[in-house]
Image (spheres, helix red, strand yellow):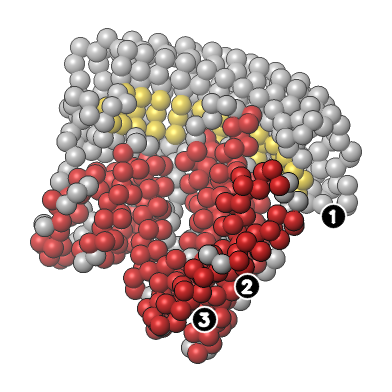
Amino acid sequence: MPFSLRILNCSYNELTGLPPFPDSLINLDISYNEFKSLPQLPPSLATFICTGNPLYELPALPSSLQILTCASTSLTALPPLPSTLQELYCQNNDIILLPELPASLTDLNCSNNYVVRMPALPDSLISLDCSYNRLETLAVLPHSLQLMIVIHNRLIVLPQLPESLRFLNCSSNRLTALPALPDALDSLYCHTNELEILPTLPNGLQELGYNGNPLATLPVLPASLINLNNDPFAGGATAPLQLIQSIEYWFPLSQRAEMLTRFESIASEENADIFSGFLNRLRHRYREPQYEGFRSQVKECLIRLVDNPELRERLFMCAYESTQTCDDRISLTWNMMRVAEMVFTVEQEGHEGNLPEMVDIARQVFRIEMLTDIATRKIQQIQRIHNTFDEDLEVMLGLQTQLRDTLCLTHVAPDMYFFRFSQLTEIDVKTAERQVRIAENRQFESWLNNWEPWQMLLKRIDPLWYEKAMDEKYAFVNGPDFQNRLDEKFQLHQVPPEIRDDTSHILGKIVIAEKTQEIFANQTRKILEAKEQSSLLEPTWTE
């Protein structure tokens, strides 16, 4: 291996051995191979992923390591953990005892092992999953903990819950009572225990599951409750708020009366009730002070909806996706709405005076489309290994939120709850970022000229030219030149005659896209040059 190598990903092969690693290596992914032992790890390593190998032990871990993923191996123990470690994923092994946890650890998944006792949990811990073990007690919980999953253990009692906790699943234990629930808690699942009573429920609780307990009575259910026992329409869950009620939460008192009056007639439109439910969940999901900027974006979007029936129709339809009971679904649905809004903006409101803004919007849509394609390939890759993988939305949303800042995706939701379920590694995220940047530098202009909203902008600027351009395109598709170019594609890709009918649809779309680029490229550049804005098409990223 070259001495300058910094990233190595040789996952999903059948490798049984490796040469010595260079000291320069920072990120290493050797998952899903046949390694039974490993060479010494380099001293500068920050991320190490060895999931899906028949390993019985790990080498000494370097002092620089920040992320360790060693799931689904044959490990019975872990080596001492470095003080720099932030994330540890060691699920699906044969571990009985965990080593001392470093003070820097934020994420720990040790589920599906044989752990009988948890070590002291560091104050920095945010996410803990120790499901499917043999725990009878838990250590004191850190004040920073937000997510705790302890399904299928032997717990009789839980320790005091920290005020920061937002998600708790303690199903399938032997609990006879629960401690006081923190006000921040969004989701509580305590199925299949021995509970006879539940504590007072937090005012902001959205999800509650308690089936399989000998409960004599229930506490007062909060108005915020959306899902009860995995059924959003089960008895006890409150009816969704009317659109008017959902709208008022987003506006200060000084604007509220005016906005409610303007939305009054909209409340009876088709799918308004579904959109209302979406807004209610979005409000609960992003209610903390750090999301003030994001809430301002939502408010601006709502103001815009009042006077745009077509945009309302598009966004109300998007809200259908959010009816599934998952907070990350809410965030992904919001991102879908913003894409629909961006498409509408360029299609209906683009003109010669706002070209920089329109091109910026187009670039964001391009990046999101690229990330969707990358996520789809990642999902297919995971499904080849795990046939039951059903966390598609976490992969989609994971790439969008992780790359929100680096790819300047200003319209998407700021974060997500369950990134850890996406199976995305740091290497996956960095690779996706690099792929999007390279693709945008090389393909954006062609994509832009094939993008229908941009074509509508060009039509608005020069209707006569657009009519001639479409005549030229239709003449090409229905004339001999199309078949000639298609035949060239068959020869280029060495397509046998017997399967050309099956491949003509795919290659034909490529031929049409290339012709569309030829037709629209000159007009795009002509308009930008007239405004001295040709630089808008220059590569944005340094490769």
| Mark 1 neighbour density, 10 Å: few (under 14) some (14–19) many (20 or more) | few
Local secondary structure at mark 1? loop
Whichever of callouts 1 and 3 sits on the residue coming sooner in the sequence is 1
Question: Which image quadrant is residue 338 in?
Answer: bottom left
Select label 2 or label 1 by which is in front.
2
Q: Is residue 356 above or below residue 442?
A: below
The amino acid type found where label 1 is placed reads Ser
Residue position for label 3? 523
Select label 2 or label 3 by which is in front.
3
Where residue 381 sits in the image (x, y, percent)?
Answer: 63, 37
Where residue 330 sits in the image (x, y, percent)?
Answer: 36, 44
Where residue 408 sits in the image (x, y, percent)?
Answer: 51, 63
Residue pictured at 36% horizontal, 54% vertical: 337
Contact (Cβ within 8 Å) of mark 1 with mark 3: no
Q: In this view, does 197 lie above or below 346?
A: above
Question: Which image quadrant is residue 254 in?
Answer: bottom left
Contact (Cβ within 8 Å) of mark 2 with mark 3: no
Q: Can see residue 496?
A: yes
Residue pictured at 20% horizontal, 54% vertical: 247
Q: Can see residue 64?
A: no
Residue position for label 1? 4
Q: Which of 41/472 is in front?
A: 472
Which of the numbered marks, if any, corresponds to residue 539? 2
